[in-house]
Image (tube, coloured by chain):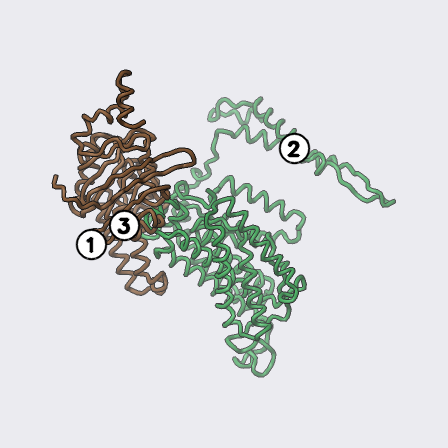
Amino acid sequence: MSQALETPTRPAIDLLGALKSGALAAIVAFGLFSLLIGVRTDQGPTGALEIEPRLVAFGVICAVAFVGGFARALLAGERLDVASYVPEQIKAAAAHIGRYFGLALLAFAVIEPIVFYHNRYILDLGILVLTYVMLGWGLNIVVGLAGLLDLGYVAFYAVGAYSYALLATTFGWSFWICLPIAGFLAACWGVMLGFPVLRLRGDYLAIVTLAFGEIIRLVLLNWQSLTGGPNGISGIPRPSFFGIPFADEENGFAATFGLEYSATHRVVFLYYLILALALLTNWVTLRLRRLPIGRAWEALREDEIACRSLGINTTTTKLTAFAMGAMFGGIAGSFFATRQGFISPESFTFSESALVLAIVVLGGMGSQLGVAVAAFAMLGAFELFREFSQYRMLVFGIAMVLIMIWRPRGLVATRTPSVFLGKPKEVPAEVVAEARQ
Amino acid sequence: MSAPDDPILTVEHLSMRFGGLVAVDDLSFSAQRGHITALIGPNGAGKTTVFNCITGFYHPSVGMVRLAHADGTTYLLERLLDFRIAKLARVARTFQNIRLFAGMTVLENLLVAQHNPLMRASGLTVLGLLGLPIYGHAEAAAIDKAKYWLDRVGLLRRADDPAGDLPYGEQRRIEIARAMCTDPVLLCLDEPAAGLNPRESAELNELLLGMRADHKTSILLIEHDMSVVMGISDRVVVLDYGVKIFDGTAADVRNDPKVIAAYLGVEDEEVEQVEAEVGL
């Protein structure tokens, strides 16, 4: 093995050092996994607790750690520059494709219900992905543009969902009236969260927003008389096609348009509904970036003191960022409520906030395309590993670690400036500020 | 120098205390309209603290800071919030450690500086979101103004580059251009020549004199580079340990014994005498 490695192009390989570092990794793995993997507790025939050693699995783990540490030490100092192995033509082609990648993704999203019309599973997955794309884009305003680290985004999702559920079940208002109301109410909550955290940044802001998300969930859980507590709200009206219900009856959607009744009609409608809402979010965000308010958000992320010295009211700027992000979260929430027909506080736990934030961070903060791709990859991967649910979080964790090593700024790390005098070009990631400062 | 008494900025009995530390002690001075006033002093003399009091980043413990526009409107700066000082009283500033928006392009930096007029033109975002032409015109005008100032500081070619990628001297000039984009009546520059070579310092002098001539901007300046201070200041105020020890023309400041004492120290026998005069 050493002979194969000691080719003239790679002089002075420190084999002993590599062995040492491999051994070190193996020792660390030994310590870490001796109890986690090395032994397994089980219930014996008498009902007593028994310890069953798992030496093979334990040995494999330690061996993997040894090989990993050995290889890492050998390759250390030699940056694996994958890009230099790719021929120029392929790079040019990739750049060309990259330019139209967003459009291709959009085209795919539009035709998906037609292609997979008979595959209910794919349609449902598409709706789920698009919901998270919308949530990601909404949170991107707060985290990616304004640089305010928000760990309680799910609170606004919950406010939107409960607003629609309560308004629709209590007053019988239609979805299209409730949607803007839910967005508005969520925006109000965004401002309410914004006020107390105006002076906070970074980690401190993250902690307070995290608490805010939990407060909303606990209130929903305990305010039995209004929200039904843990039982949630059921019988939420399903959406109608602008007043025409999706039902197998005389004035239903299928009968009105002379089609044969099919339950898929509603699913397809829901799909296009969330696609339209997500695209609205995207359109508004892209527009806002080119307006003074959007530039002020980004300036706030870069340097708050400089903003104040230029006459920018940082209070209102922060609050509008919170309100905008919350509004889209609320709208996505009311879509969620009408799609499920049943909501309970269980759907609005911290893990939802974490997932949406992970999508934003993975996608590259501030990048619309990156967030969409990240939502697709993340939820797609979750579904792929559904059958191996035991290993799902493990693979998820490893993937996150690898991405943070290779692309610490997310999939799309560059920032596109909002205005140019000459030819458009990207801003490299190194100079752009991040939410956590 | 013609000296009609028309102060743009009047600082009276300004004191700033941080706990037990008195950073600025009973400071009074004024800056004349259309003049370049330099605020100098050894390190730690309290110059930047005075700036922070004027621009609202600190609230002075005692004292009054009055700004008078040419039309007679006066603002009491110690009562205004920092962003209102920039917005209403139109006092702009730069920072000792440059504070550009590093991840945004130079042009974007200069557009952020025109936030308030653009915000008004975009109908608090609503009209702009709908894409009405009124905002388009306003933005085009803002870009023209940014181009004008980039041209003035000689950096038009860097307009589309990220501000954080520019070399130090160019960042200083961009920061001045950005401050000028807010249409200030008073521009406060905190060590604009720090880190510049002699040629760049000379260019800075030209720029500041040109700005004053063409735009009637009054300038208040903290500086250690004496070629800048002596070359362009109409008036020099010297601080030492938060106390004003000199206030007069650039020509006189070189020969003032208290200033020399503050900067260079004095012979042992002179110490007591000078300290008595300074009031330490």
Tell me where residue A355 appears, x and y as whole percent. Answer: 56, 52
State the residue position of label 3. B90
In the image, taking residue B223 as reference, residue A205 lies left or right, namely right
In the image, taking residue B66 as reference, residue A279 lies left or right, namely right
Name the kind of residue labelled 2 in the image.
Answer: Ala
Dot 2 lies on which element?
helix
First in sequence: mark 1 vs mark 3:
1
Image marks 1 and 3: residues in contact by CB distance under 8 Å: no
Query: How packed is label 1: few (under 14 Cα within 10 Å), some, or many (20 or more)?
Result: few
> Residue B93: which quarter of the image?
top left
State the residue position of label 2. A29
Dot 1 lies on which element?
loop
Name the kind of residue labelled 3 in the image.
Answer: Arg
State the residue position of label 1. B71
Q: Is residue B153 among what the camera can see?
A: no
Task: Tell me the brown chain.
Answer: B
Note whether A136 is above or below B44 in the view shown: below
Image marks 3 and 2: residues in contact by CB distance under 8 Å: no
> Residue A262: which quarter of the image?
bottom right
Judging from the image, mark 2 belongs to the subunit labelled A
Query: Can you name the residue that lies furthest to the right here?
Result: A46
Task: Tell me the green chain.
Answer: A
Note whether B99 is above or below A328 in the view shown: above
Query: How many labels, in total?
Result: 3
Q: Is residue A86 among what the camera can see?
A: yes
Note whether A234 is above or below A73 in the view shown: below
Q: CA distance from mark 3 to mark 2?
A: 63 Å
Q: Residue at x 43, y 46 (%)?
A: A413
- Foreground residue among A420 and B244: B244
